[in-house]
Amino acid sequence: MQRIQAFIVLCICCAVGGTPALAAPTDLHDLDQVMGMLAMRQHGRVEFIEQQFLSVLSRPIESSGELRYDAPDRLEKRTLKPHAETLVLTGEVLTVERAGRRRVMDLHAYPQVLPFVESIRATLAGDRKALERLFRLDFAGSVSRWTLTLVPLESKVKQSVSQVRIEGAQDQLLRVEIRQPDGDRSLMTLRPSSLP
Amino acid sequence: MNVRRARVLVVWLGCIAVAVIVVVRAHYSTDLSAFLPAHPTPTQQLLVDQLRDGPASRLILIAIEQGDAASRARVSSSIVERLRKDPEFASVNNGEAVVGQTDREFLFQHRYLLSESVNAQRFTAAGLGTAIRETIDNLASPAGLLFKSLLPRDPTGELLNIIDQLGRSPAPESHDGVWISGDGTRALAVAATQASGSDSDAQSRAIDAIRAAFATAAAESPQSGSKNVQLRLSGPGVFAVAARAKIERAAVRLSIASSILVVTLLLLVYRSLPALGLGLLPVATGALVGIGAVALGFGTVHGITLGFGITLIGESVDYSIYFFVQSRQTQGAADSWQRLWWPTIRLGMLTSVCGFASLLPSGFPGLKQLGLYSISGLIAAALVTRYVLPALLPAGFTIRDVKPLGLRVGGLLRGAQTLSGGAILLCGAVLMTLAAGVLYHDRASLWNRELSALSPISTEEQNYDAKLRADLGAADVRDLVIISGPDVESILRGAEHAARALQPLVDEKVIGGFENPAAYLPSMATQESRRSSLPSAAELRANLSQAVAGLPLRADRLQPFLEDVEATRHAALVTPRDLAGTSLNAGFDALVLHQKDQWNALLPLRSAAVGGEIDFARVVAALERSHVDDARVLDLKRESDALYDNYLAEAIHFSLAGFLALTVLLLIALRSPLRVARVLAPLVLAVLTVAAGLAIAGVHLSILHLVGMLLIVAVGSNYALFFDRQANSEEAADSALTFAALVIANASTVIAFGLLSFSQVPVLVALGTTVAPGTFLALLFAAIGASAVRSVHA
């Protein structure tokens, strides 16, 4: 019975309050220019190395793979090491496939998961409106080298992410850092794909 | 004479009084059981129980249509939130998370008893290492991060395992957090009622609660997009309630309408209120005696018997018509009528009884009851006409002279007399050959062999239901594996055994999946083996420190894990009672049925593709291979269609036997094969013509058409016998009066049954479209045949 599906909800077990973010002036012109350049791209393919710093673990865990983007709303994160996992975000549906198991999550039901994926997708799409629906935006630097800081607006979202920092140059993303309210964070470094 | 008259009336009133007492004290049922076997095989019993009380019978499918997507989602959420507080419902789901604190705590507390992954190997150093590494890997994914805070207590990720175990069914598509149909035009939800599907009153309450919740929800959202949002419900309970209302409405409306028409007709003919009142006495007595006889014979009277019975003994109105019209001639006419016509009516009544007796041996309680009702009703009506009506007839009683009507009809038939007997015989033979040819040509598709033929639910509604079920994925409980045993523990063990046998079929995609009560609550044996596989605190500590060597996790962070495992080792096992208060309870209850001294575990199977068929042979083979001996596999639709098909075949055979019996009866009574042939030919021709006509119109015949054909023979035999009497009587009977009586009787039958054809209820339509044209044709053919005989004699 589908009722059981509801139990997936039990996933929502980490509930810690968020931290308020600071307001800062934004260079709107440069932000729009960067967003415009990003929006021009229909497809993107980059390699990533991600490090997770979790207080519960004594050392960071590292994973790597490939990130693909297809306009307007498809983001695929294929982790190759240490274990194969594919994560596809289409529209509002996140599909996670690993070890032959497939989980489908409607992100409406899991607002906690949303910032982890939507921050990257909306930035790659150059969709400022989508970003502003979820986050307060703070742009620093110039078009050639910029930093976009995203602070969640909704309290439910704040429970899982306190801040997302995206660094980039022109229409390339270089680093994505996601900070969680409990002090844990992840750092993703991106570079052009050399994978077949 | 007066003493005799008083005696007759006393006996009659006494019978009425007894019948009234029996009828008042009888038990009436409106549930499905009229359509279900009286002496079921064990498999049929399971089928009956499933249809009546099974999990499928409790589901109400809720669709929200029109408006815009956001409004539909909002209304869906609001309805579900409201209904979840309503005790009528065991569960309500639209895909939205039930953040059940109780559920979460329950699963987490008992995770080492409930998780299928728990075994001795799991807690060795190697097992722990693998499990913990996997949990850490999970943390790297955003979805796994949700479990981060649980790591110190649940490093082996048992909670996630249980959730996977429970969530194996595929979810419908969803949008804005609620389930939607594949084409995105409706929001969907499923409610399971606490009461069984056969409890129409409870189903009706549940439906009202859903409608009320919808009305409130729609009124609450002021946005323009939700202005025209519509609610549509489907499911067995909804159908049952709608069908009940529909049949009640149709029965009431139609019987009022046909009563008015027939009464008007009789008033026009008789021009006498006392005649009308007296004329209805045989029918009324017949109906009362019929119900009484059924109540005495069966204990319970089905709604269907009340609904159709009165139409079946409509023939008895004819008796009084014959009596009044034919006895009109002279003073002391009642006596001469008794001499002249009573034997004919008696014979007609007996042939009808032969026809209806063929319903008695049916395995279908509904048909059995209709048979008994008709037989006892007709006999009572005939006796009342014979003995009570003459006794009640006031002195100087007279009705309007209907001779002109008879003469006019006789004039119409004169055309037929100009034809030679041979020509008429030839025409009849040609028509019969044509009709038989049509029936032979359509023989493969002549009968509708599906139970849905009797369903008062329109095809559109059935298709809509199927569409919702397809969109909702697993909700269609059609194929089941059933495990029976003397107690809960035995069936849960059986269910676990069966699940192990079925899992390979899921992997090979023979079936899409299955549900299992043991997934909610494992058997005590399984729980016990899991509990005993948990190592002692010291051993676990040692294994753990070995397991985390090389992992980015320090053993001392996992102290809470050690404590929880130790606590479970001394904790009690989980019993069905512990499920109370969690939403697991509804899932478990729906799959576990208790009957008398037997328990049944249900494992509904899902087909691999939406709407696909399940390869039953492979399911049976897999269960046999694994020696799951106490399991049965049931396809509800196939079983119920087979059951109905069986009834139908049986009813056809018994009807033929009934026809044979009435032929023998006529042979004995008329003592002339030629006369019997002349009586039966118009009836057979009428039945064949009507059946061929229906076949040409694309109608597949159901069991109710068969009952209709019996009625054609029952009513038509009176007509044919009158003509036979007319032709073979030495006394000069007034043929014009007989014509008039037959035409009036037939008009009332055609009116009553013709009205049924306009009903929305398929069973009534079947009866109406068969009997109205059939009796008319029977009269026409009998009249033409009689004039042909006369012209030959002349």
Image (spheres, helix red, strand yellow):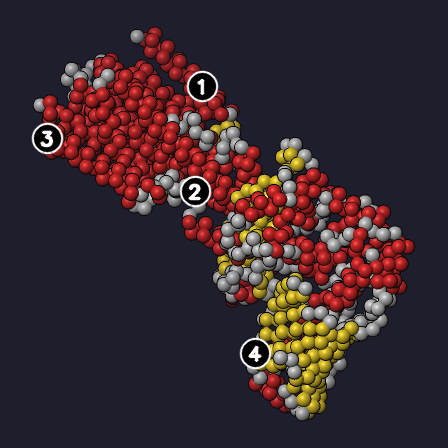
Category of crowding for the residue at label 4, using alpha-carbon neighbours closer than 10 angstroms: few (below 14), some (14–19), many (at least 20): some
The x, y position of residue B677, in whole percent, is 22, 25
Query: The disc numbered 2 marks a residue on which chain?
Result: B
Q: Calculate the distance from the C-alpha at mark 1 to the C-alpha at mark 3.
A: 55 Å
Residue for badge 4: A71
Provide the residue designation for mark 1: B17
Q: Who is closer to the viewer here, B255 or A88?
A: A88
Judge depth for marks 4 and 1 and give the one in front: 4
**Lower position in the chain sequence, tag 1 or tag 2:** 1
Question: Quarter of the image holding residue A6?
Answer: bottom right
Q: Which residue is mark 3?
A: B420
Q: Secondary structure at mark 4?
A: loop
Measure the C-alpha gap from mark 4 to mark 2.
Answer: 51 Å
| Amino acid bearing label 3 | Ser
SS state under label 1: helix
- Going by the picture, which residue comes out furthest to the right? B538
Badge 3 density bin: few <14, some 14–19, many ≥20, Cα 10 Å: some
Front position in the image: B557 or A139: B557
Q: Quadrant of residue B560?
A: bottom right
| Horizontal arrangement in the rendering, residue B419 relative to residue B37 (left or right) | left
B679 relative to B96 in the view: left or right: left
Name the kind of residue labelled 2 in the image. Glu
Is disc 4 in the same subunit as disc 1?
no
Would you say residue B251 is visible in this rendering? yes
Q: Residues within 10 Å of mark 1 (few under 14, many from 20)?
A: few
Residues at marks 1 and 2 touching, judged by CB atoms closer than 8 Å: no
Depth check, mark 1 against mark 2: the one in front is: 2
